[in-house]
Amino acid sequence: MTDRPAPDRSSPAQQRFEDAARAADMKPENRWVEGYADYEWDHLRPLIQAYGLDLAGKDVLEFGCNVGGSAVVLAALGARLTAIDIDAATIAVARANLDRHGFDAATTLHVPNTRTIPLPDGGYDLILANSVLEYVPADWLPQVIGEFHRLLRPGGHLLICGTASRLSPIELHSRRWGINWLPRAILPGEQRGLGPIALAKAVRGRFVDASGDHWVAARRAIHGRLSPINRAIAALARSPGWVAPYIELLLRKP
């Protein structure tokens, strides 16, 4: 079993990480900065394993890597990793985060326009979009999904997880009730959920659903059991990740 990755806090990369975090207006000691890799080790890693994905030696692209929490996990699982983000200050944090964990071989790249990602066709076995697609502008989504299709090899997978859904009665970032169901023109800054119908339209003809029963297995792997709500979702939907409060799907490029 792969050990939990630990940062070398005595390394020069640690100081670069702290400096980059402050430059990005973050507090380095914050749980979602300093501790994000630990969180994803306990959540993303069992999810990846529940979906039957072996990343060792695979070419993996993380779309929207934020401060690098997921990126550290992907690298620890043996992926040949490229991590990209739309924000230059954030990608600097991710770079230092990978380095302080000893994953200096990973590639990081600032991509300000994700409708045209400057990477080669068919270069990846897996693309991870973790807690990020809800931030993609609605009119960009079809082009971004098209880029995922271009970048994946035939048979490659797109793993979408942690993506707040507009089906949820609670907006999962602000915790406000009902605003997901309002027209987007109302409170646009607080409506960050992704609509499953919009996603389904964007992936149609490009990907097939390979989620199977893995959504249920992932819930058990992460939480040890199915909550009553998740049990109901699993009973009502053939592919529960489409209708859950957080969209979670494994899609395959034919």
Image (cartoon, helix red, strand yellow):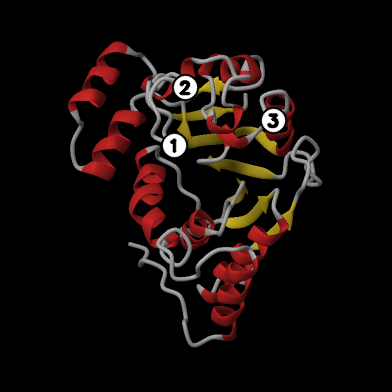
Do labels 2 and 3 touch, CB within 8 Å?
A: no
Q: Earlier in the sequence, mark 1 or mark 3?
A: 3
Q: Quadrant of the N terminus?
A: bottom left
> Which residue matches tag 1?
174
Percent x, y for residue 168?
40, 22
Q: Residues within 10 Å of mark 2 (few under 14, many from 20)?
A: many
Under tag 2, what secondary structure?
helix
Task: Between residue 31 and residue 37, name the one nearer to us.
Answer: 31
Q: Quadrant of the C terminus?
A: top right
CA separation, marks 1 and 3?
A: 32 Å
Name the residue type under label 1: Ser
Do labels 2 and 1 touch, CB within 8 Å?
A: yes
CA separation, marks 2 and 3?
A: 32 Å
Q: Earlier in the sequence, mark 2 or mark 1?
A: 1
82 shown above or below 177: below
In which image quadrant can residue 227 be found?
A: top left
In which image quadrant can residue 93 be found?
A: bottom right
Query: How many numbered marks have been drawn onto this rendered protein structure?
Result: 3
Name the residue type under label 3: His
> Which residue matches tag 3?
149
Q: Residue furthest front?
A: 186
Percent x, y for residue 228?
18, 25
Percent x, y for residue 121?
78, 39
242 shown above or below 135: above
